[in-house]
Image (cartoon, rainbow, N blue to C red):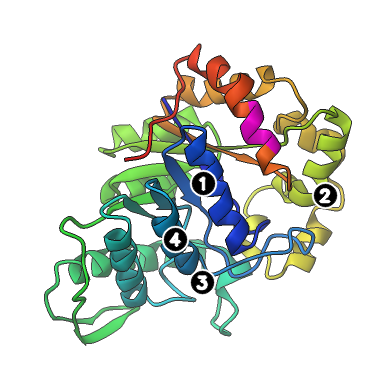
Amino acid sequence: MEIGYALSCEEHGPLALVQQARLAEDAGIGSLWISDHFHPWLDEQGQSPFVWSVIGAIAMATRQRVTTAVTCPTMRVHPAVIAQAAATSAVLLEGRFELGVGSGENLNEHVLGDKWPTADERLERLEEAVELIRTLWTGEETTHHGKHYTVENARIYTRPETSPKVLMSGFGPKATDLAARLGDGYMNTSASAELLQRYRKAGGKGTADGSLKVCWGTDKGACAELAHRLWRTGGVPGELSQELRTPALFDQAAQLVTVDAIAEHMPCGPDPAPIVAAAKEFADAGFDRIFITQVGPDQAGFFAFFTRELASALRDIGVEPRASE
């Protein structure tokens, strides 16, 4: 299984994200995830740069592969615009770009005043959007009058030689089935063997990607406190993460999430063993790639730890980075 690095646009500004990409590359990591948000989950996280600008900067700074994790191409940004942005990113990255998509969260998608659709309608919109994006990537002039989207005489001129792969997130059965039908790969933030098996049995192809948050530092207790302050939303249950509208509401929903609850599910502190154990869960579930992210500001310290201890410990269980191209 390959290990990559996940860039958190919720926690870091654009210059910091580019620097983290460089640090990851210097540590031998050649693949990146990058989140695509309009808002952070919590005000304490404090950032949310425009992902397409950051991708352009990363393309000029490194030779890494980049996947959005994930873009919602259905409401806040029209799929025709996403098609153009992704095509340009793929050109800048010389083919090292993958478009990760999902059905989105109300947190980001309500900002233009649109009604937040039901889950079934969001998946219906996503299916139409992905089909439209792929049509536009052919470079042909496109007119489309669908149920949810209209495009007239649209043509994308700046395109890569090969269209990007479209990876699709699937956190539940219906989304996983759609990913199996339409996607070139699968994405999940949990090591769900059940959903991945469902994806494969339904004909899903390509790589299966997962993500793992850690909070490395010399003091385990301080790391747990930091992880709770910045990512206590990880304890918000069920579908609330898709339904809440603002960071303030996420703060309210996470009031009962304790430091211990976050530390139980997120490796915290200086010991590589919990990180290795968490990565092994993804490997055992059948995932092909896992993207790790360090919570908090000490990115340089984490990458020094990765080079010094973590990389070799992961290699012992068959998890290692793929070099940049």
Q: Which residue, as the protein is rendered here, is positioned at the far top?
A: 316
Q: Looking at the rendering, in which quadrant would you find the N terminus?
A: top left
Residue type at numbered disc 2: Arg
Residue 8 against residue 309 in the figure, above or below: below
Q: Which residue is mark 2?
A: 229
Answer left or right for 282 relative to 134. right
Query: Which label's residue is closer to the chain start, 1 or 2?
Result: 1
Earlier along the polypeptide chain: callout 4 or callout 3? Answer: 4
For numbered disc 4, what is the local secondary structure? helix
Give the number of the disc on residue 55. 4
Residue picked out by circle 1: 22
- Tell me the SS state at disc 2: helix
Q: Which residue is pictured at 80% across the width and 52% down the height?
A: 254
Front-most of 259 and 235? 259
The mark lying in front, picked from 2 and 4, is 4
Q: Quadrant of the C terminus?
A: top left
